[in-house]
Amino acid sequence: MGRPDPRFRWLIAIAALLLIAACAPRGQLAFSDSPAGTPHDILLATSRTAIAGTPDFGTGRAAEMSFAQYTVSVPPAHQVGQIEWPGARPDADKDFVTTGYQGLADARAFANAVSARARALPQGHREAVIFVHGYNTNMAEGLYRFAQINHDFEARSIPILYSWPSAASPRDYLYDRDSILFARSDLEDLIDQVSRTPVERILLVGHSMGGQLVMEVLRQRAIRQGKLWPKLDMVALIAPDLDIEVFRSQAREIGPLPQPFVVFASRRDWTLRLSEWLSGSTGKLGTIEDLAGLSALDVTVIDTTAVQGRGVDWHLSAATSPFMISLLKGLQQGDDGLAVQAPRTALPSVRIVADDDANGLVIRSW
């Protein structure tokens, strides 16, 4: 009996991923008055339609952005990299819960909230992180994931979640891709608003399809204004669901990329492999193997192939692997930003391999 056709194995893997994603319970907001956990105040800007009578937002595309602030409590029993999702009876000792909510009337109220948070920080440390979630994500999932990241990385910056209108369904990949185009101007406006506050530095982080949105916004801004925001201090794309050829084209139109510009990639990212199949892409930036195609760009690639995150996938290992979290927490310290921006080879692009067995980063040039 001959060996099975590799294409058949791919079809089985794709079918399994779709089945698992379709059957998995979705994250939901859960409220509690208990002070048991560690609170994190997350600012929200969203292009989703509001769900009437609730502090939640749905999957529709809104004509105008909405703004709010949520306090998310991380439980004392929290495990690094994990979201302890609440069940029918939320328990603040064991679960992520929402302990506070404040709707913000408009963009001015949002900017005032950012300004107040910035002024409460010492000068030189007034930093905001804008997190853009990925495909197949509802608002609660994006909110609790960002709270987990904020908590595990012990961040002292101002956390701002931009939640674009994902359908939150594995079957609606094309809807989500269209929503990325829909959301471009809103995310650009959000960065404008934050840059006009006393915030000194902006870090822009995009996960999965959120990385595509980040690049579209940078490209749009460069075309409209001829330059990016002076306060934009770093861009990180985690497992970007972005065709490599499209990325190169966007980067050419943007011009000099913000520094550091970091891409987290894994050749074991089966979610992106599925995306390649769905979109007909010849290769995603988040699974890149050969850096020669990025040689003209000032990009640092952190290869997380050897590091598995929580669960069975490598799609968010940079933020869910206890090893990566510990490693990156050490790198983010220091006045010069991420230490990964320092190494450079003869080519501008460099691959830095995160290896759990090696207990650190291995710098390799491609």
Image (cartoon, rainbow, N blue to C red):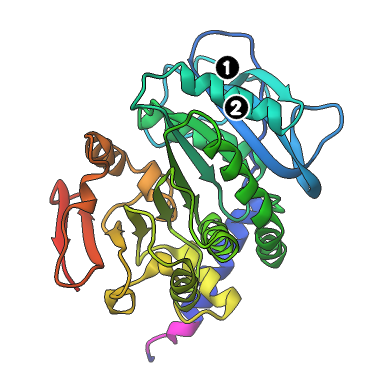
Kind of residue sitting beneath label 1: Asp
Report the residue marked by disc 2.
Answer: 86
Q: Return the residue nearer the eye: 94 or 129.
A: 129
> Can residue 5 be found in the magenta stretch?
yes
Q: Quadrant of the rendered structure where residue 6 is?
A: bottom left
Quick one: label 1, few (<14), some, or many (20+) residues within 10 Å? some
Give the tally of numbered discs.
2
* Residue in view at x 55 percent, y 55 percent: 210
Q: Main secondary structure of the magenta part?
A: loop
Position of residue 263 relative to residue 120, above or below, is: below
Apparent side of residue 15 relative to residue 207 in the rendered image (left or right):
right
Q: Please provide percent x and percent y for residue 313.
A: 43, 55
Position of residue 279 relative to residue 228, above or below, is: below
The answer for how far apart the CA atoms under marks 2 and 1 are is: 7 Å
Q: Please provide percent x and percent y for residue 274.
A: 53, 69
* Residue in view at x 43 percent, y 55 percent: 237
Q: Return the residue nearer the eye: 208 or 339.
A: 339
Q: Return the residue nearer the eye: 61 or 229.
A: 229
User: Residue 91 bears which disc, if any?
Assistant: 1
Q: Secondary structure at mark 1?
A: loop
* Residue in view at x 55 percent, y 24 percent: 115
> Can residue 352 be found in the magenta stretch?
no
User: Residue 77 bears which disc, if any?
Assistant: none
Q: Secondary structure at mark 2?
A: loop
Q: Sequence order check: which comes first, mark 2 or mark 1? A: 2
Quick one: label 2, few (<14), some, or many (20+) residues within 10 Å? some
| Contact, mark 2 vs mark 1 (Cβ under 8 Å) | yes
Residues drawn in magenta: 3-7
Apparent side of residue 138 relative to residue 360 in the rendered image (left or right):
right
Kind of residue sitting beneath label 2: Pro
* Residue in view at x 58 percent, y 55 percent: 20
